[in-house]
Image (spheres, rainbow, N blue to C red):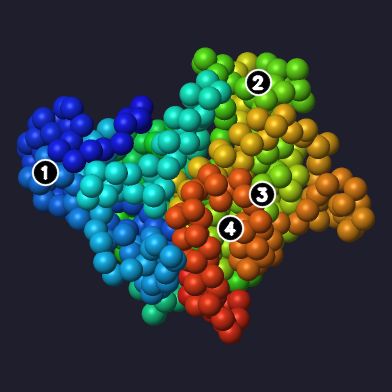
Amino acid sequence: MTTLADPVPGGRPGDVERATALSAELTGRGVHGIVLAYVDTAGIGRVKTIPTAKLASAAAWGVGMSPVFDTFLANDSIVSTDVLGSPDGDLRLYPDLDHLAVLSGQPGWAWAPVDRVTQEGERHSGCGRTLLRRIVADAAERHGISFKAGVEIEWAVGEGSAPGDDFAPAVSGPAYGAARQVELSDCTAELLAALAAQGVDVDQLHPEYAAGQFEISVGALDPVAAADRSVLVRQTIRAVSQRHGLRVSFAPAVFAEGVGNGGHVHLSAWREGRSLHSGGEGRYGMTAEAESFAAGLLAHLPALTAVTAPSPASYLRLKPSQWAGVFTAWGRETRESAVRVITGTAGRRAQAANLEVKPVDLAANPYLALSCLIAAGLDGLESSAALPDEITGDPARFGAEEAATRGVRRLPTSLDEAVEEFRKDELLRAALGPVLADAVIAVRLGEIAAVAGLDDGQVAAAYRWKY
Ligand code: GLU
Ligand code: MG
């Protein structure tokens, strides 16, 4: 369960004692250092590390890190907003002890996600993790609703020995192929063992469609824990693969052409232990609230892409007929509509029903993405938004007129378009708050400028190894 209170200087009651005991236990287990992890606005995982003996001090007083990373770009250059991007100031990183994991893929290391707090002990308005925790707490208070979420992870496995920044797939067997599974047998077995030792509940691991591609899905958790887990699982995949001489890419598009890496988000809303997506009077057992929640997602999706598909490379992936879901449409078990309604198998629907949002990739900061997805859905729920008719099959087949009649819109085809949609979406900007909303815009414009003049192949190459 995610701790709902924000960290404070000196530590919340019991934190320091707990960290002291934990650091002794970790030292006994051969853990020398702890990775303190967060994700910046551009979607890059950033870290500081501390020796294990400093865990109690970090729980009490945090660890220093500049707020400037909120306006870093994927290429490590820096843009600025009215309040962010200055070389001045400092923040404190507070590890969340509830989510600390010993890293089996990196012997000697443990890992913990952090909340970022000002030196005065106040919430840092650029901290996506704090934001998500508050959005979840607010939904519980206002609507009695809680959420479960899961982020699917797709990645491409390349040979570590490929020259320069080239990608040479480490496997050649077919999509979903038995041959490809055998080719990566040792590495994936070690990966499953590492994730199990870290307490990660893996649902499935399979060879995916694109060259060298695999996918892992994990059990649903509360949204903050799901975002943490998505970061931890990627850290583990990278570490285990590297020990096998492999290099992994979570980039939305490893190449300009073909199927990319998605980071589909599964989301379900619950009240008093009952799913809103099952046992209702609406379509496929959805309650009226669940239908309106889905309608809210659809309505905000064009603007959401600025957060869920934040890289210029994201738009190389977001193409029709590649299962990335680039149309504002929903359907049961559809793979070309942005929102896939999953009812689950007969007998298990009360637990399994959920919504899958497809136009999300792993360049997205998962805390910001989940914050905005929940805010969009709740906007629909609060306004009792009507869910349009279901669309089955590939919406790409509709001509302009039919698409318009059915309310089907193509999602932005470039990051520029996504930013324009985001600027117009007051609800999403308010959900992020002015500091993060401005950071999102500044960082996206920075990424757009960084790739000016590059062709698609060069854009894919520029981001291939960043995420
Ligand atoms: N790789 C596809 C994407 O970019 C998804 C494939 C699938 O449905 O799992 O979203
Ligand atoms: Mg997949």
Depth check, front residue: 144 or 254:
144
Some atom of ligand 1 lies within 8 Å of the CB belonging to the residue at label 4: no
Q: Earlier in the sequence, mark 3 or mark 1?
A: 1
Depth check, front residue: 370 or 107:
370
Q: Earlier in the sequence, mark 4 or mark 2?
A: 2
Compared across the picture, whether 423 is left or right of 129 comes to right
**Dot 3 amino acid type:** Leu
Compared across the picture, whether 117 is left or right of 30 comes to right
**Dot 1 amino acid type:** Ser
- For label 4, count other residues whose C-alpha is less than 10 Å away and answer few (under 14), some (14-19) or many (20+): many
211 is higher (above) or lower (below) than 96: below
Mark-to-mark CA distance, 4 and 2: 30 Å
Q: Earlier in the sequence, mark 1 or mark 2?
A: 1
Q: Earlier in the sequence, mark 2 or mark 3?
A: 2
Where disc 1 sits, the SS reads helix
Mark-to-mark CA distance, 1 and 4: 37 Å
Residue that badge 3 annotates:
301
Residue that badge 4 annotates:
306
Mark-to-mark CA distance, 1 and 2: 46 Å
**Dot 2 amino acid type:** Ser
